[in-house]
Image (cartoon, rainbow, N blue to C red):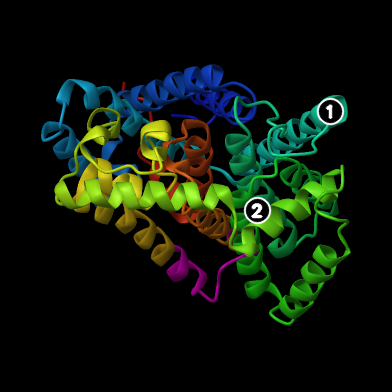
Amino acid sequence: MNKSSPIDSFNFFCLLVFVFASQFSISVTQIALTLGVLTWLTKIQITRTWTTQQWPLATPILAYILACVIAVLTAYDIEYSFPSLKKLLLLLVFFWVLNSVDTLRKRDILVTLLIISSTLAALFGFYQSWEVGVLNTSNRVEGTFSTYMTFAGILMMVGLVAASRWIFHRCREHWLLLPVLIISVCLLLTLTRQAWLGFLIGSIYLIWNWRKLYLPGLAVLLITVILALPSKNSNSLPGAVKHRLHDMISGHDATFQIRTSLWEGGILIFKDHFLTGCGFRCVDLIHKSYPDPTGFVARFRGMHNNFVQLAVDTGLLGLAAWVWIWVAFLRQIHQKLGDPTISSEERWVLHASSAAVLAFLSGGVFESNFYDEEVVMVLYFIIALPFAYSPNTFASRHTHTQMPT
């Protein structure tokens, strides 16, 4: 099938809508995803090219899917947990993107669109801050999303993608510095510390692989900025930032105490459902059977930690399979980076996806961001990029994609 065929054009249009809408509307994003996946699968069936499709990470992903199905079949309440299995369909984002983006031009257009749309969302966050003001944790910037945590999680990942492209691309695109600055400042406005932590971890990774000597300078800069911030009681954004940082390192952070209580409650549940978990959303039903002296488990029902949440919902089998996905991903990226002939076009994408995953996993220690559909769809798009364009792979693939007569 010719690259410019109607079915390919429509599939790419769905990708464009998916990427742009991912920053503004989950409904439009899901519609674009559904139409795009159906178009991709239709093309494969018409051209009979199932065997030429790429399926990286298929083994750990299938293991995770199987563990989730087992968790539901052995759940405390199967009917209550079953609807959550639909979230597994979001994994199609990964395979759809990597098998549909068959040229460097398409990949660059999609990445550029993602950065621009995220920058526009961040600018809207600035407008919110100007209109309402961001002075404390009860009044945070939510941007174009329903919660500040979702907004911060997406800004965190896209900001690292833009930074990686500027740092590692052979042709320096200095315009990217503006999106990085806008996204970074807006990330501060969300006052979301787990996203700050993830962005910091991802930035350290990028700088370590770029100029290790810059890391001490980064540490000095951060310390200087923190010390220069006004009093944490100051009625301003810098004061609010300092207040959040002060609480984090003082040992008297109320939200951290809430999280530790949730983790303790989750571990108690995990011990009783060690192997396969008690099923998705099971905490809603069984929390009364466990000690909850603070009342936080009954109030929040979620663990605010990806690892604890998955251990509760899917047991050791699901948690191990989920960790396997990320270990396998990072291992493959490491192998690709070890190729001395790798071009800057590939290197920046490999580092971008690695930084985004490290940020996501770091932030997920303090938030169940894996259960956030908007965040996960953007994550799957980003981790598909290193597999999405390979000249050798797609050259051989297109020799088998002629429409049958």
Asked if 163 appears above or below 105 in the picture, the reply is: below
User: At x 34% / y 42%, what residue is drawn?
Assistant: 53
| Circle 2 residue | 196
* The N terminus - image quarter: top left
Q: Left or right: where does residue 383 sit relative to residue 130? A: left
Instruction: Say what secondary structure mark 1 lies in.
Output: helix
Q: Do the residues labelled 1 and 2 touch (CB within 8 Å)?
A: no
User: At x 46% / y 49%, what residue is drawn?
Assistant: 259
Q: Left or right: where does residue 133 sit relative to residue 264? A: right
Choose top left, top right, bottom left or bottom right for residue 23: top right
Whole-percent x and y of residue 59?
24, 51
Which mark is on residue 127?
1
Instruction: Specify whether residue 58 is in view.
Output: no
Please tell me how crowded label 2 is: few (under 14), some (14-19), or many (20+) other residues with Cα within 10 Å. many
Please tell me how crowded label 1 is: few (under 14), some (14-19), or many (20+) other residues with Cα within 10 Å. some
Residue situated in front as seen by the camera: 340 or 175: 175
Which mark is on residue 303?
none
Instruction: Say what secondary structure mark 2 lies in.
Output: helix
Q: Residue 334 colored magenta?
A: yes
Residue situated in front as seen by the camera: 405 or 93: 93
The magenta stretch spans which residues?
A: 333-346
Q: Residue 196 colored magenta?
A: no
Residue situated in front as seen by the camera: 184 or 190: 190
Whole-percent x and y of residue 346?
58, 59
